Image (cartoon, rainbow, N blue to C red):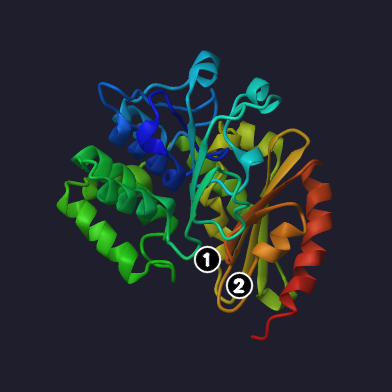
Amino acid sequence: MMRGMRAPVMITHVVPDADALGAMLATAIAWSSDTCHPKVSLPEGSLSQRLRFLFDWAKVTAATPDDFAAADGFVVLDTAKKGRCNLTRTLKRTDWSAGRPVVNIDHHTSNTRFGEVNWVVDDAGSTCELVYHLLRAAGRPVSPLTASLLYAGIQTDTIGFSLGTASASALATAADLVACGADVAELGERLCRSQSKSEFDLLRVIYANTKLRAEGQLAYSSASYEEIHGAGCTAADIDDQINVPRSLNGVRLAMLFTEGNQGKTRINFRSSGNVTVVDLAAEFNGGGHGQAAGSVLDCGLEEAIHKVVPRAVEHLKKFSS
């Protein structure tokens, strides 16, 4: 279906991480030609400080409302639900696809298959891995730039190839991307060793607010609206901080509560061993993967913590140590 599109818009989820950005930007670059002019949906304020360089590298055009109106199709990547697409508030209130084809490419277990074409591989380590195989199957070029964008997504979604999702396929794909010219050293510097002072200050907050429950098997941390913005960050900068409570020895379920926008609390869930969290996230209208999920509650930070932490403690009891 993508072959017939001439003015598609590529879209990913709100607060896009490196996998979402890499997949969207690489797909747009690979399909750009004299007869196809893709745009990408990146509303103002939706890029984190840490990942802005990926967009700067890609040099693709961000879609305007007029581009959405003129689009002959949409490619939605790394997004489990249509309602989680990264769109302006005005577009969210409309039927933005308006009967035009939607191609849905994703690896989330909770994907609702909202597209006319749905390619969902929920045991893939990242959407960037899927895009790599799509480009190869379609005979599209994988330039050093495209390889770098896709490698960034695979590397970060597997946390440096340290998760069980770092399968033989993921590792082989990463190796092929390096052979295609992915700039591993520069990506490592940008993704792992280039925190801004504001990001560093936010980490101080996350460390200071970390708490343990369930005899040390559950850890959670939080950051209020005032703490996030006081550090010089925004909602777009919340992502990898979940690894702080997750890193404690003995923790099997970790959560991060953040009120990046007043009155809305985002929850990141992570687990290890035989503990799953996608079902816990679903109780709060969220979704994701078996051991990595998220949700958003329409309430303040403290109310969200009081609602979710006791339920998470009970949830953990279902899994033997």
- Label 1 crowd (10 A; few <14 / some 14-19 / many >=20): few
160 vs 146: above or below: below
Is residue 222 rendered to the left or right of residue 86? Answer: right
292 vs 115: above or below: below
Tell me, yes or no, if residue 115 can be seen here. Answer: yes
Q: Which dot marks residue 251? A: 2
Is residue 163 rendered to the left or right of residue 271? Answer: left
Q: Which residue extends farthest top?
A: 66
Q: Are marks 1 and 2 in contact (CB under 8 Å)?
A: yes
Front-lying residue, 64 or 52: 64
- Label 2 crowd (10 A; few <14 / some 14-19 / many >=20): many
> In what quadrant of the picture does the N terminus appear?
top left
Q: In x, y percent, where is residue 229?
A: 63, 32
Q: Name the element at disc 2.
A: loop
- Residue carrying label 1: 247
Q: In x, y percent, where is residue 3?
A: 35, 36
Give the residue type that dot 1 points to: Ser
Q: In x, y percent, where is residue 192?
A: 36, 49
Is residue 177 rendered to the left or right of residue 192? Answer: left
Residue at 56 percent across and 78 percent down: it is 273
Q: In x, y percent, where is residue 203?
A: 54, 47
Residue at 36 percent across and 64 percent down: it is 161
| Cα gap from disc 1 to disc 2, whole angstroms | 8 Å
